């Protein structure tokens, strides 16, 4: 059985190198492969080359194919059982495929401590063409406007001793370097409170943030700091939590509709 696992993973690693399979699909197929019996795994490997080792296509074929006795190789009942058990992993695949670049960055960073195959600027450049690297930010002239994205290394929250104004000071890095960022209240704008309200919280270590501001001497004076959500499912429990939240939201909406309907009844 271990040899079958090794052979399957060897093939999948080659597909990754040849850019024939995405990371989310690789994770999905690995989970699905683990649900198979030893006999089913052997048949999948024998059929693999016919279907470019696409596990789903192999299983669909085995569902309709007949053995030497004319019986289905995978019975309908077995196929439905597999579908039931793989359903959460399919949800993970569907969701993570929509955020593949961020998912790749998140998984590599979580498992290895750094992302080796993709950079934050690669992920966000399409939606914000004016984003530059932190190395470029550090090379800008004073008062020059900048926009960049990075990961928070540390952050402190304080009040000025004389002014009493709140400020946040953070160290932020990307794959090219790091810089200090200051977000400070002014007489006209409470930037720290605004940041907290717009992001439903204050940035913290490990957050990915987008920063707009201007270059100062050895510091970036931020106008806006937006926390970028990392919505990636790497555990089945996250899927179940999402389903629970969706169910609770649907019930709440239904109750609100009923309540509103009752208000409109003329008696």
Image (cartoon, helix red, strand yellow):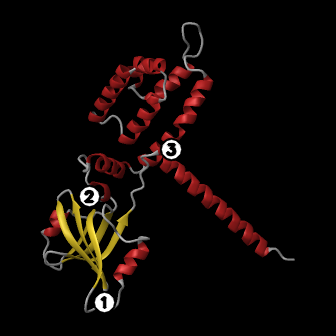
Q: Most extreme residue toward the right, as rendered?
A: 267
The numbered mark, 2 or 1, whose residue comes first in the sequence reads 2
Q: Position of residue 10 (x, y in %)?
A: 30, 26
Does 267 sit left or right of 154 as displayed?
A: right
Of tags 2 and 3, which is closer to the observer?
3
Give the side of residue 49 with respect to residue 240, left or right: left
Q: Residue 265 at x, y = what percent?
A: 81, 74
Image quadrant assignment for residue 158: bottom left
Q: CA distance from mark 3 to mark 1?
A: 49 Å
Disc 2 and disc 3: Cα gap in Å? 27 Å
Residue 238 point in image, percent of width and height: 48, 50
Depth check, mark 3 against mark 1: the one in front is 1
Question: For the residue carrying disc 2, how many other residues have a C-alpha within 10 Å: few (<14), some (14-19), or many (20+)?
Answer: some
Q: Which residue is mark 1?
A: 164
Q: Which one is closest to the eye, mark 2 or mark 1?
A: 1
Label 2 belongs to which residue?
121
Dot 3 falls on a residue whose secondary structure is: helix
Residue at (30%, 31%) from the top-left corner?
A: 13
Quadrant (top left/top right/bottom left/bottom right) for the C terminus: bottom right
Between residue 63 and residue 174, name the one nearer to us.
Answer: 174
User: Residue placed at 39% from the left, 26% from the top?
Assistant: 53
Q: Is residue 242 above or below residue 14?
A: below
User: Which residue in the protein does label 3 denote?
Assistant: 91
First in sequence: mark 3 vs mark 1: 3
Residue 96 on image: x %, y %: 42, 47
Whether residue 99 sits left or right of residue 173 in the image: it is right
Looking at the image, the residue that sits furthest to the top is 69
* Residue at 44%, 34% in the rendered image: 31
Q: Quadrant of the N terminus?
A: top left
N-terminal of the pair, mark 2 or mark 3, is 3
């Amino acid at each position: 059985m271990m040899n079958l696992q090794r052979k399957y993973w060897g093939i999948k690693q080659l597909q990754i190198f040849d850019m024939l399979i995405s990371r989310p699909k690789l994770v999905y197929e690995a989970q699905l492969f683990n649900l198979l019996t030893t006999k089913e795994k052997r048949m999948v490997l024998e059929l693999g080359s016919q279907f470019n080792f696409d596990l789903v296509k192999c299983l669909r074929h085995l569902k309709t194919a007949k053995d030497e006795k004319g019986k289905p190789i995978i019975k309908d009942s077995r196929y439905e059982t597999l579908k039931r058990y793989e359903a959460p992993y399919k949800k993970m695949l569907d969701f993570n495929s929509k955020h593949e670049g961020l998912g790749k960055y998140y998984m590599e960073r979580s498992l290895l401590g750094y992302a080796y195959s993709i950079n934050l600027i690669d992920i966000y450049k399409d939606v914000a063409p004016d984003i530059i690297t932190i190395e470029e930010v550090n090379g800008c002239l004073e008062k020059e406007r900048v926009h960049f994205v990075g990961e928070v290394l540390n952050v402190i929250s304080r009040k000025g001793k004389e002014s009493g104004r709140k400020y946040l000071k953070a160290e932020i890095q990307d794959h090219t370097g790091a810089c200090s960022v200051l977000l400070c209240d002014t007489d006209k704008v409470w930037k720290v409170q605004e940041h907290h309200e717009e992001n439903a919280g204050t940035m913290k270590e490990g957050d990915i943030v987008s920063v707009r501001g201007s270059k100062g001497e050895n510091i970036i004076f931020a106008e806006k700091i937006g926390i970028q959500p990392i919505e990636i499912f790497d555990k089945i429990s996250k899927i179940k939590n999402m389903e629970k939240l969706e169910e609770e939201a649907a019930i709440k909406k239904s109750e609100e509709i009923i309540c509103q309907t009752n208000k409109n009844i003329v008696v």
